[in-house]
Image: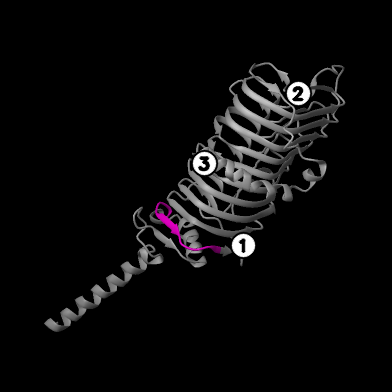
């Protein structure tokens, strides 16, 4: 072979190898402007960029799931059903997404996975984002997690976000919240949500909250206004901020509107801030709230309703709360044996049942309850087996009142009127 032929052969082989490398290489930084670093984030400048981010993260591309992003313009993603970013816990978004105070609108009629939101599962930081979303659908044989920002916040951070969310989901088990459906050891901070939420569990537990359906993390300087309701045949948890809060803290938060639970559940928990509390609730307010639970189950049922929380367990600490709430509970079940004195309904201006601590709390409003079994109700706590310090009731200020039946049935006008004040209160708390 001549020297020139050898060179041509070597050149052809090099070109072939280079082509193979380019074809086999993962998506490059050319997918977005920027380099994905904190100082030079990838720029999300269009719907196409946003969808490309979904594709890369959901494909398990770690280079992109861990990168930094900056949204540069408002986006309307309603032309087709949105596919959330981060399709599973193993393919969660773990980078930083800065919304840059821009707005994103999206809708989901039936999620492709059990995590429904702009982000499916988040283990990173999502901040400075305005959202308007609709999430709906009935699902079989799964647990659905639905939230405006993300379905599940898995040790992630969500901060300084404003959400307008309509969520209506039903499944074997369901968790829904204006910001996140479920929070596992994460942080939700300085977020405001205007919501209309309904979650139904067909077989298992259901949790619904104005901010988060169920939280094992921290919620601070946040608020929700609107309507939050849940229905189920097993345990039902519903609250103005969270359906349940376990071993962590909710502080500096405000809630307003309506909270309601219904169904045939053996255990039902409804609270102006938290349905069931096993953590700390501090320095928060309940404004113009109507809290109710109606149980139509048979046999032994337990219905807990309170202006702050339905039930405060022995690990729960509730401090420095003002409550303006109308509290109502009812149960039609009758005990199945001769013991007709077992408590079925527990209702209070602060809590239905307390085994933990209440300190420096004041309740305005009213409490009413009824049942075919026994009723324990009180202006402060229906049944107190814990500690209560410096808590009392007062007449509601003349400048405010608890919501009427009409406002409870039509939460949207109430939400629209109070969101600005709620956001202002949150901003004041930040100073």
In the picture, the disc for residue 379 is: 2
Residue 310 picture quarter: top right
- Within 10 Å of disc 3 (Cα), the crowding (few <14, some 14-19, many 20+) is many
Q: Is residue 146 left or right of residue 366?
A: left
Task: Determine whether 144 is above or below 237 in the image.
Answer: below
Q: Kindly report the distance in space between the C-alpha atoms of the residues bearing marks 1 and 3.
A: 28 Å
Helix, strand or loop at label 2? It is: loop
Task: Kindly identify which residue carries mark 1.
Answer: 81
Horizontally, is 193 left or right of 401 in the view? left
* Res. 169 in view: no
- The numbered mark at residue 73 is none
At horizontal 43% and vertical 53% (from top left) the residue drawn is 65
Percent x, y of residue 297: 82, 33
Residue 63 screen position, x and y as percent = 38, 55
What separation in Å lies between label 3 and label 2 (alpha carbons)? 32 Å
Mark 1 packing: few (<14 Cα in 10 Å), some, or many (20+)?
some
Q: Is residue 72 magenta?
A: yes
Q: Position of residue 95 (x, y in %)?
A: 42, 50
- Residue 243 vs 417, above or below: the answer is above
Q: Is residue 421 left or right of residue 24?
A: right
């Amino acid at each position: 072979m001549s020297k020139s032929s050898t060179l041509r052969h070597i050149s052809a082989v090099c070109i072939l190898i280079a082509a193979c490398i380019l074809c086999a290489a993962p998506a490059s930084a050319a997918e977005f402007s920027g380099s994905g670093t904190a100082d030079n984030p990838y720029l999300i400048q269009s719907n196409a960029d946003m969808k490309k981010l979904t594709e890369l993260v959901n494909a398990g591309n770690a280079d992109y799931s861990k990168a930094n992003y900056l949204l540069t313009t408002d986006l309307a993603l309603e032309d087709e059903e949105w596919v959330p970013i981060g399709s599973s816990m193993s393919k969660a978004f773990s980078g930083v997404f800065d919304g840059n105070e821009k707005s994103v609108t999206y809708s989901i009629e039936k999620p492709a996975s059990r995590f429904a939101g702009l982000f499916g599962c988040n283990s990173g930081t999502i901040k400075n984002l305005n959202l308007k979303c609709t999430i709906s659908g009935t699902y079989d044989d799964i647990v659905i997690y639905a939230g405006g920002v993300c379905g599940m916040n898995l040790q992630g951070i969500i901060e300084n976000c404003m959400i307008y969310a309509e969520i209506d989901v039903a499944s074997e088990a369901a968790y829904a919240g204006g910001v996140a459906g479920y929070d596992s050891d994460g942080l939700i901070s300085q977020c405001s949500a205007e919501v209309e939420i309904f979650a139904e569990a067909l077989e298992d537990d259901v949790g619904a909250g104005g901010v988060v359906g169920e939280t094992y993390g921290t919620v601070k300087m946040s608020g929700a206004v609107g309507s939050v309701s849940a229905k189920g045949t097993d345990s039902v948890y519903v609250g103005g901020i969270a359906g349940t809060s376990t071993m962590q803290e909710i502080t500096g938060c405000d809630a307003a509107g309506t909270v309601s639970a219904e169904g045939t559940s053996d255990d039902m928990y409804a609270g102006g801030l938290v349905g069931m509390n096993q953590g700390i609730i501090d320095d928060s307010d309940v404004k113009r709230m109507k809290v109710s639970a109606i149980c139509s189950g048979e046999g032994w049922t337990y219905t807990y309703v309170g202006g702050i929380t339905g039930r405060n367990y022995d690990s729960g600490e509730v401090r420095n709360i003002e409550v303006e709430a109308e509290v109502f509970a009812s149960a039609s079940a009758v005990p199945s044996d001769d013991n007709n004195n077992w408590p079925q309904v527990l209702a209070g201006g602060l809590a239905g049942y307390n085994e933990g601590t209440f300190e420096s709390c004041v309740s305005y409003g009213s409490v009413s309850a009824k049942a075919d079994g026994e009723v324990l109700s009180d202006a402060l706590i229906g049944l107190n087996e814990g500690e209560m310090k410096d808590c009392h009731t007062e007449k509601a200020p003349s400048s405010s009142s608890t919501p009427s039946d009409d406002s409870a049935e039509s939460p949207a006008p109430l939400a629209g009127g109070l969101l600005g004040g709620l956001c202002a209160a949150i901003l004041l708390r930040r100073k």
